[in-house]
Image (cartoon, coloured by chain):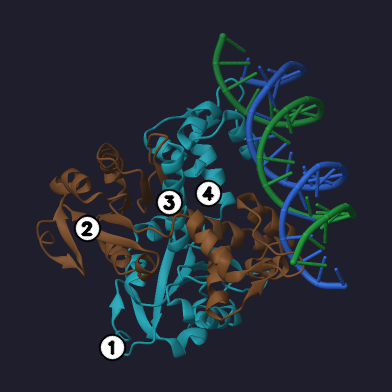
Chain colours: A cyan, B brown, C green, D blue
Amino acid sequence: MYLRYLEALDEDGQRTASSDELAQLCGTTPAQVRKDLSFFGSFGKRGLGYPVHELTDHLQEILGLRQEWRVIIVGAGKIGAALANYRGFRQRRFTVIGVYDNDPAKVGSSWGAAPIRAMDALEGDIARDGAQIAVLAVPGEHAQPVVDRLVGAGIRAILNFAPAQLVVPEHVSVQSVNMAMELERLSFALANSDQDG
Amino acid sequence: MYLRYLEALDEDGQRTASSDELAQLCGTTPAQVRKDLSFFGSFGKRGLGYPVHELTDHLQEILGLRQEWRVIIVGAGKIGAALANYRGFRQRRFTVIGVYDNDPAKVGSSWGAAPIRAMDALEGDIARDGAQIAVLAVPGEHAQPVVDRLVGAGIRAILNFAPAQLVVPEHVSVQSVNMAMELERLSFALANSDQDG
DNA sequence: AGGTGTGAATTATTTCACAGCG
DNA sequence: CGCTGTGAAATAATTCACACCT
C-alpha cells in the first residue's frame, strides 16, 4: 500500500514524504508507518522524512517487483477474460504467457499476445516456459484437481478466483479472491448498521 | 468461512461438527473456532459439537444473508461483465438490478435480467429501486467521483474493483478487491522463498 | 524545529487448560 | 467420557514517547 502511494508521489515529483503524510494517505498512524518501514531497513532521514524515489525503489526490490514474472491463466471464461485484459499485469512486469482451457472452440485463438492452449499442454508448457505464477479462474469444482496439476508441474504461487478453499503444500503461496466472502462482509455491515443506527 | 464449510457439511447430511473438525477444514485451531462462534452465542452442545444445520441458519442470520440485497454494478467493462454473470450473487440473494455505463453503445441493452442504463440515471434509479450495494468496476481515475455520487444517493456498501483507495464517510462500508496487491504478495512470497530455500 | 528509529507500555488476539454439561 | 464455553496466561500488534540526527 505504501508503494502505491509512493509511486504516485514520485510521479508528482515530490521528493520526500513524512510518516505523517504516508499515514494520512494510507489511513493508518505515523507510528505504524515507521514501524512497518523500519522492519526492512532505515530508509528515512531525520528531520526530513522518507526520500520518495529511493524508498519506492527499495520497496519494489523487497517485493520482488524488479524482475519479470511469467504468469499463466487457467480458465478462459469471463473472469479469465477480464484478467487477461487487466492493465495492472503489465504495469508490474507480470507477463501473461498463456491461457489454458478445456473448450476446443477457444483453444488455438489468443487473447492479446497470450495463446489459448489445451489443458493437456499445461504441465509441458509450464516446464518449457518457466511459468512461475498461475491465476486460477475455473469453476469451483475443478479448482483442486487443477491446483494439484499446477503444483506438480512446479508452480509455487497461485492467485485463486475459484470459490474453493485450496489445499497446497507449504512451499506454495496462495492468494484467494473470494467474491462471496466480500459480499458477505458487506451484508454483515449493512445488517448491523441497521440495528445500531 | 465457517459458513462456507457448514453449508457443505449440511448438504452432505452431516448433523454435527466439532470445533476440531471445523478447525481442520478452515485451517485454524479448535480454540479459535470456539472463541469465534461464542462471540455470537452458545451454539454448541457439549459432548457432541455444533449442530450443523442450526448453526448454518444462525450464521446466515448474523451475516444478514436471509434477506435479499439489491445490487447495482457501475461499469459495464470486462470486469463488470464477469461480475454480472457471477453465480455467487444469486446463490446468496444478491440481486443485480441494474448496470450503469457511459458508453451509449451499451446503454439500452441488458445482461441477463439487469438493464444497462446511462450514468445520468444513477441517482434517480438508486432512490427509486432502493439499491443497497454498489459494485464499482470503473477505471481507477473515475472511481472516487462515482463513489461520491453513490454515497450521495444513499448507497452504504461498496464492493470496489477499481485500483484506487476510496474515501467514504464512516457509515459507508467498502470492501476492495485489489488485484495488483494480491499479485505483489505472491511476488514477495516468491522472491523471499528464493532467498530462503 | 522537524521527524526518524526504537525500546517500553498498552492493547488486542490467540492459546491454554479446565470446569461443567449432555 | 467427549466436547463446549470461558477465564487466565501467553503472544502479537499497536501506540507512546523520547533520544537523537539533520
Mark 3 and mark 1: span between their CA atoms?
Answer: 38 Å
Does label 3 lie on the same chain as label 2? no
Residue B80 appears anywhere in the view = yes
Q: Earlier in the sequence, mark 4 or mark 3?
A: 4
Mark 3 Cα within 10 Å, few/some/many (few <14, many 20+)? many
Point out the frontmost of discs 1 and 2: 2
Q: CA distance from mark 4 to mark 3?
A: 32 Å
Q: Can you identify the residue that label 4 sits on?
A: A60
Q: Nearer the viewer, mark 2 or mark 4?
A: 2
Name the residue located 69 percent from the left edge and 71 percent from the top edge: B21
Q: Residue drawn 31% across and 49% down? A: B132
Image coordinates of residue A161 in percent, x first then y, are 45, 68
Q: Is residue A59 left or right of residue A13?
A: right
Give the label, 4 or 1, closer to the camera: 1
Disc 2 from disc 3: Cα separation: 18 Å
Residue beneath label 2, please?
B98
Under tag 1, what secondary structure?
A: loop
- At label 4, the amino acid type is Gln
**Location of mark 3 (residue):** A186
Under circle 3, the secondary element is helix
